[in-house]
Amino acid sequence: MASEPVEVRETDEELVRQSASGDRTSFRRLVERYQGAIFGLLVRMVGRHERAEELAQEVFIRVWQSARRFKSGGLAGPWIRSIALNLARNERRDRWRRESGLKELEHVAGSPPADSPEDVLRRERASVAAREALQELGEGFREALILRDLEGLDYPGIAALLGISRGTARTRVYRARERFAAGFTRRVEGEER
């Protein structure tokens, strides 16, 4: 009776170490594992799909270039996300400077078909209200909320990524949710008048 070959899946950390030694196949696997999550994080942080695609490419260029500096015993996922988060912070800061602090709205993408034009308009307004309420949050609150509720990170992961305590991570998420809900409600109720 012949046994089927067992596929051994390298850990993310092994892929980073192999990439550091120039193994392009390992690097490609690492990119394939993380590209969707990193792109999603960047879209939520910078609000524009095209720019998020460019930043995602930059994230993986930096991963390739700095793989030799990856700390043994570290976790690759939080390390890659921290690179993405830093690039998103820089992008937001630079964009704010370029646009003199004006908030930019992104195009509503991926809306499901509606039964009526009113449904389309209602969904679009809710989407805009949600984006505006999210962008209105301070950077620390916005990052904590996105990492917890949209990226699904646990509080220890948020704390490690943002360099804060677990208690502070919980508090930021709680306050961000309150502020987001208030901002969203204010915008939606303002539209109904």
Image (tube, grey):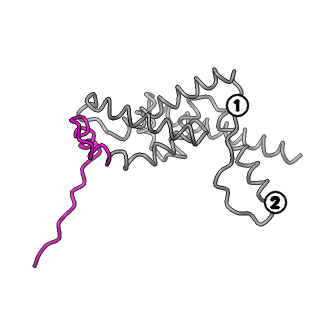
Amino acid type, callout 1? Lys
Q: Please identify the quarter of the rendering in which residue 111 is found.
A: bottom right
The residue that label 1 is drawn on is 103
Q: Residue at x 23, y 37 (%)?
A: 22
Q: Residue at x 58, y 24 (%)?
A: 93
> Dot 1 lies on which element?
loop
Q: Residue at x 64, y 55 (%)?
A: 110
Q: Nearer the viewer, residue 31 or 86?
A: 31
Q: Nearer the viewer, residue 180 or 58?
A: 58
What's the distance in space between the residues labelled 1 and 2, CA to CA? 27 Å
Mark positioned earlier in the residue sequence (1 or 2): 1
Q: Residue 25 at what x, y percent from top left?
A: 26, 47
Residue 54 against residue 123 in the figure, above or below? above
| Quarter of the picture holding the N terminus | bottom left
> Dot 2 lies on which element?
helix
Q: In the displayed structure, does residue 155 sit left or right of residue 8?
A: right
Q: Nearer the viewer, residue 88 or 154?
A: 88
Q: Residue 46 at what x, y percent from top left?
A: 58, 35
Examine the structure image and report whether residue 36 is included in the region drawn in magenta: no
Amino acid type, callout 2? Pro
The residue that label 2 is drawn on is 117
Q: Which residues are the magenta region?
A: 1-29
Label 1 crowd (10 A; few <14 / some 14-19 / many >=20): few
State the mark number for residue 65. Answer: none
